[in-house]
Amino acid sequence: MNFESKLNEGEFFIPECAECKKIVWPPTEFCNHCFGIVTLKKGPFEGTIMEFSRQNEQYFCLVEFEDTIKIIANISKTPTIGQKVKISKCGISNGNYFFQVI
Amino acid sequence: MTKVGIVGYGITPFTKDDKKIESVLLDSARELFRNNSQISRNDIDAVLVSTNNNSKYLSPILSEMAGIQPKIAHTIESSCNSGTNSIVSAYSYIASGLADLILITGAERYDSPGQILEWDNSRGEYKHPIFWASIFAKSYKREFSISDEQLAIVSVKNHKQAKENPNALSNKTYTVENVISSKKLTDDLRLLDCSRPCTGGASIILASEEKTKQLTDKPIWITGIGQKTISAGFTKNNSFSSMESTKLAGQTALKMANKNFKDIDVAEIHDAFSVCEPMALESLEFSAKGHGMDMINELYDTNNFKINPRGGLIGSGHPLGATGIAQTIEITQQLQLNAGKRQVDNPRVGLVHNMSAAATSSTVLVLET
């Protein structure tokens, strides 16, 4: 089980070091703090919108989780700074991760 | 440790031409040697190529095409600041005594693969640079109450200055209204807010102190170097309205040169997008936080070319691997009082700021007469 295989199944896990318990982001095999083995922490996780913009009719936003990791995600309704969100859809398409929050 | 000087340069116009990367490389090197007959190709110790192009073995290829058999030949890639990374590498070879005379050539095609950082999956499907630039622009405008119209003056200023640069991609001037009414890429970014990828090359020769004095009577010395990498991924940035790597690289370079920002007479700033110029000016301490646009407005109103005299990336175009070298050539020309209609009044100290991937890394150089 690794981050990408779970993401490919539509599930968002947070990678965490089994030894020092630090969140490892972007997801890799080994912790960038202690080189310990990375395991996956199961959600759901609440994220906070840090910033957003819009291309055509599609809003995209920068979301922070666990005060540590940030991703860029789609959001369907007009976002606000500080808004609490959770991942509603995620996966890998054409080699790219994608995330949607509500 | 020997001083390191700039003894020659060659640059060709930035275009949208569909040319082989090897030809783009050779164009500016040819220009350099044809304009600097005092430099013998037999004396070149190293040839460094700066590019994001995927073609292999480009430095030996350039060396062969240019009739050079160097001791050291390799390519350097670091996305948009490959050019100044190459200059730093060349500086280090010379300062260490491994080389006395080095040719650095940067080149890129308009369709460079370096524009997208595929590795950065935390951006999700938003990997194109316009998306980090939109987040930067939104964050900067929000924090400092700046409007789109106010930010547009960066593009207006840099296109105006590029008109005096015969090698620039753009030779048009624009109004604030033109910028605002240009194609809307996102809510926070118009087409004219963006630098454009293009085909272009630039070459420069660095030399040891002894060689520099032999080869030119207008030496320009590299007196300060600062570099900082915070991360590779855009989302690792802690601030989206300032540039941490630029701030740290700038402090290091100015300290090495024993200068501060007030000593800088002319500067090339990495304006990949309009918002990058005020952010970089603030991070380099040219202006207080949130007041970068005040400085830019004053420069524009007074027709002062101090910042981005060649038109910046927005006006000149952005052939990634050539950009840092073209910036360094501009400051060299300025300090040699050889910048034509772009000439700033009697500059003595210049600065080059070149960055990559949403300012996750930056290089700053200080140049002096």
Image (cartoon, coloured by chain):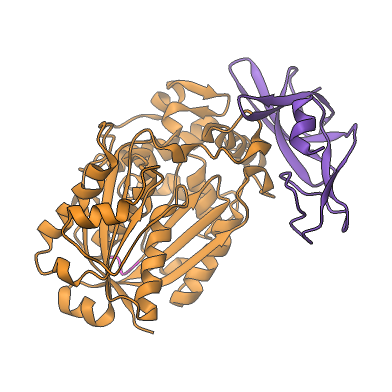
Asked which quadrant contains residue A71, the reply is: top right
Q: x%, y% of residue A63?
A: 75, 35
Q: Which residue appears at 43% of the width and 71% of the height?
A: B224
Q: x%, y% of residue A27?
A: 74, 44
Can you say whether B100 is above or below B178 in the image? Answer: below
| In front of the other: B72 or B297 | B72
**Magenta region, residue range:** B345-349
Quarter that holds the C terminus of chain B = bottom left
Chain whose colour in the figure is purple: A
Chain whose colour in the figure is orange: B
- Please state if B149 lies on the left or on the right of B35 as rendered: right
Can you say whether B98 is above or below B323 in the image? Answer: below
Quarter that holds the N terminus of chain B = bottom left
Q: x%, y% of residue B342?
A: 24, 51
Residue at far front of view: A1
Residue B349 seen from this side: yes
Question: Is residue B293 highlighted in magenta?
Answer: no
The dominant secondary structure in magenta is: loop
Query: How many labels sit on residues?
Result: 0
Q: Which residue appears at 40% of the width and 42% of the height?
A: B54
